Amino acid sequence: MRNGTRLGGLTWLAAVVTVATACTGLSSSGSPGSGAISVNILTFTGPQIAEPLQRRAPDFRTANPNISISVTTVPFSDLYQKILTDVSTGTNSYQAFVFDPQWMGDFVGPGYLEDLSTRVKADASLKWDDIGAFFRDFSATYQGKVYTIPLDGDFHMVYYRTDILAKDGLKPPETWDDYLAIAQKEQGQDLNGDGQGDYGSCISKKRNAQAYWFITSIAGGFIQTDGTNQGAFFNTADMKPLVQNEAFAAALDIYKKTGQFGPPNEINLDVGDTRGLFTSGRCALSMDWGDIGTLAIDPTTSKVKDKVGAVILPGSKMVLDRSTGKLVPCDATTCKNAVNGINHAPFASFGGWSGAINGKVSTAVKDAAFKFLSYMSAPEQSNVDVTIGKTGFNPYRTSQFSDTKLWVKAGMSEQAAKDYLGAIQASLQSPNMILDLRIPKTQQYQQVVLDKAVAQFLAGEIDRDTAMKQIYDGWEAITNAEGRDKQLSAYKASLGVQR
Amino acid sequence: MRTLFRRRSALDLGPVSKAISYVLLVAWAFVVLFPLYWLAITSLKQPIDVDSGPVYLPGVDFKPTLDAWKYILVDLQSDTVRPYVNTVVVGLSSALIALILGSSAAYALVRFRYSPRVGVIGLFVGCILFTIVALALGAAVPLAVVSAAAVFLILYQTVGRRFKRVLGNSDVAFWLISQRMLPPVAVVIPIYVLFQRVGLLDTRQALIITYVATNLPIVVWLMRDYFSNVPIELEESAAVDGASPYRIFRSIVLPVAVPGLVATFLFVLVFAWNEYLLALFLSSANAQTMPLTVAAQNATRGPQWWYMSVLILIMILPVIAMAVALERYISRGILVGAVKG
Amino acid sequence: MASSDNSETLDARGPTPVEGSGLEVATGERERVAGHTFRAAVSAKNVFLWPALLVVLALSIFPLIVSLYLSVSRLEFQANGIDVRFLGFDNYASLLFGTEQDHFIGVLKPLTPVGWIIVAVVAAITARAFVSYLRGVNVRLLGLLLRAIAGLLLVGLVWLFAQTLFAQGGRPGTLFVTLVYVFVGIAVQYLLGLGLAVLATQRLRGQRFFRVVFLLPMTITPVGVAYMFRMLTDTGKGPFVPLFDLAGLQNFAWVNDPWGARIAVMIGDIWQWTPFMFIVLLAALEGQDQEITEAALVDGANRRQVFRHITLPALLPVTTTVILIRMIEAFKIIDLPNILTNGGPGTATESLTLEAFFDWRTLNLGRSAALAYMLLIVVTLIATAYVNLVRRRVTATA
């Protein structure tokens, strides 16, 4: 009997579990409203990106009672393989995705994505021509066909503290040499009035985070001069990587050198950490996407409201001669797009969250999904969403720059709004914007080979030349395994180069 | 203080040892609790309090706020409750099933002798390969399975009996534990495909089955040792009295092994409660569990420490409650009492 | 597949039930004695064991075979799904000899004297174990062959290990970083866990509190623990910043130093998994008959003697089990290095599973599976050696 009471707790537990398990069958079979076309959209869990989709879905439903939208989210870091597993095994649990257009290289080839060209043309409310030319013609387009609808504009800019630079009589950086000079001057100064020394520059250098984008942002100004379709990753003639030359060497050195004027543990900081440092007033300079602009006006995250300026990515007065691999000075022929003798190449890293539709679902569902994505991107919705920090949406439409009122309403000062939008506009209108790599196995080129070599170089495991050789060899190995012709034509297709 | 240091039996410590013991216990308790304290206060901070350098005491060096708690529990109510219920159901069910199946298997491995033939095992593996090849070549599923089973039976009756080499209980146990050696990244896609074929993706059942299978080897290994400490005389006398093996197992062996059962239950519960990668793939909208929600707090804006802290805290509360409730079962005297009868 | 190889190795010892338990000689006889009364035993025998075996079998065979096949092939995404192209052993070759060698194994350099000593000691121990097997009664050809292979692999592994760690300019790859995590981690966890379990079984007030508290770290999801340690170890905003400043280490960052980063990962691992050792050992200690201990103490034995001669031997079976389980789990360490440092600085903290994960998440499933199988081979080798060597020792003392 005594044993019976001792086991009592376990028996009780067993009963609870049995009941709970019994409920499993009942509760896991929820189905959306009958008669409606249901569209399940996959994106990542955040307040960002998912929030506006979820917030606007009910309004959309009111206008379109026969379409029911549900948003499923997974952790950001696992979105890519989750989507690819789902479509490649034919599971097709999701009818639409809000994802990184960089992944198009892997998705378009096997036909996982729907061609949206005709739908886009037929849809007046989307105001396609209002979308920045770069996002319209390059980011959303692959081989001349439209596959995604942009919801967000992503590219790197350099942020600086207006109060600090004004105090020391410095101008915002135009070249990376300027950047390093400012960082060196401010390193160790107290920038937020807490009596502690702060940092000249905060740029994320963590492995397997964003380092491979930042190195490209620095290298871009040295490598790409002739406009977006020149490309900054491979030679468009023979698919040889552009990573073993004086330009890339200079970029590696600059990237490493910014670390001298940053936090001691910068090698382990990802972009979330550097944003936190910048908005809490501990850095004079930083390189980031558009997010700092909206985070800086949020009182729960920021001590630097109205003290933040932004400029287009610094450029270079020396650029790469692709035939020799050497750096040559900027002139009218070598730098067609130079401003004041400086070649800028803003980098549309990541490319901005965009909506795409699964190619394997019925036409009715595709139409419904398109309707929702178009609704999200239309200026009436998007021009408001881009001013809200937590949406994670950054500006990508011309109409979003013309009017600073929305931004002032969101909490920016007139001057800050002008600064922020000016930098975005300068980048967006640059004909020399760099398109992020989007060919089959993009993730292996960037996240595995490039990222590892850069991390090893920053940590001092290997020297600069070994790092460049490692990237070159690693990229060549992937290219050879995939087939050089196939990769080259995919690369050209992504750049919009006519064959 | 006198009761604290009074010595009652030979097992009690002397005052000096007692003091040292307390110091050590408190020191480790501090090591364990400080990180949790840090989580607790982080959940009360604004982002700016986290980013601008360490602050330690709510109300003293920063102003506590319940924003993060409100966001997780109120704003995201359904997105928190759904995975939470899933975690509870999946964790408890899979732990209990694994405990039942695993402890009986462990008991069997301690008390009975098994001698599987090498030839039969080889034959079995061969037939599974045959099925897979047949499926890869496009055979229908029932056809492939039935013909493989037929081949297996025929060969077993004719050739299989000629291979006399046998394995022992320890080999069975080792085979079980070796099933945990492959890292999850290697098995997650095949398991995904498996559940996709049977139409169980995004259900709690899929997660329960998976966790039972992955946790069974641990139950078997741990319970084997506890059972082997149970004196066999008790079972023998019960057998002489005519009790069936099932009854002996249920009424004599299990009660005596309660400390081990409780410890093992806590382990497999915790493993299932906290598993990430398989949960990520086997669920999409309905069956997501809490570890996914925690990991998801690191998105494009960097880790949202405040939300993450709230989630971790609410995630461990039930496990702590369970540990408090079950701790008394891991207490002295059960075995001794049972032996004395 | 690989598991049947293990079984072969184990089989060579001859069938002995219940390894590692003090009862093993007895059980065989007992079963025969009890055989008369256990009429129902024949069916019970199957009912008890088979459900568990079938569940494990159902979910393990298919993934095992699929990933073996993936490891010798390459994936292509096609319009109608996935195309798997057979490659042969390219994935393995690139890890062992090719472009990934310095990543997987490490940078190999000539040995220092310390390195030579370590290799010699391990070789001597292995040789001795091999010779003592030869002298035994139960020598079989298959057993001999498998032992010879296992021994050579083991010595080879140690030799490579020494070339990365005990050599000028050498750098350990993911394989050896993982081994360091496993062995250092388990040693510390076991000792801490044992010490805490002994303390927690003393007759002191507040034990229930301590027991529950000591259990806590294990209950947190590993991803959460990793993020928590990232917060705690941050040298800009973590709680220990003032301590660093006091020590004059304002510009110190553990993460810039390969060993600093590895130690941070190990501390996190130890913090989380010491409770596992603690609770298993606690349950085992509580299961022991206190009267024997008490009697010994009354008879004038001191506590150290009681611990050494009564408590410890009784804990041996459970000890071998927890160490084996933790070893198998620890080889799969991934969340801490992934979240704490993402494998950095450079590749210093990257574990084998993390390397496989990085490949896997860019859908290079072939190399990922090859890495997983390399891990399986190493774990099997070490686990088999462990079971064989330690089991014999335990049997000898028990």
Image: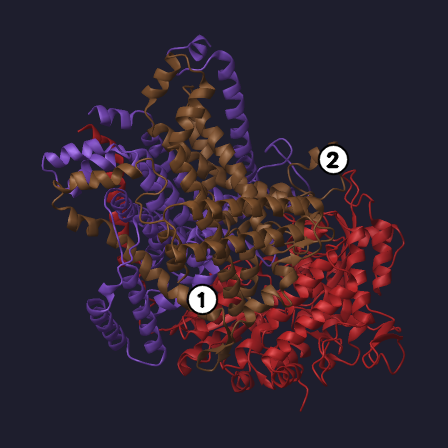
Q: Is residue B12 above or below residue C112?
A: above
Total labels: the figure holds: 2
Q: Which chain is brown?
A: C
Q: Quick one: which residue is furthest to the top in this view?
A: B2
* Mark 1: amino acid: Ser
Q: Quadrant of the C terminus of chain A?
A: bottom right
Q: Secondary structure at mark 2?
A: helix
* Mark 2: amino acid: Asp
- Asked whether, in this view, residue A188 is left or right of residue A31, the answer is right
Q: Is residue B47 above or below residue C1?
A: above
Q: Decide which of tag 1 and tag 2 comes sooner along the chain.
A: 1
Which residue matches tag 1?
A: C67
Q: Which chain is red?
A: A
The label on residue C245 is 2
Q: Which chain is purple?
A: B
Check the residue under mark 1 and report the chain it is in.
C
The span from disc 1 to disc 2 (Cα, nearest Å) is 50 Å
Q: Is residue C233 above or below residue C54?
A: above
- Res. A424 visible in picture: no
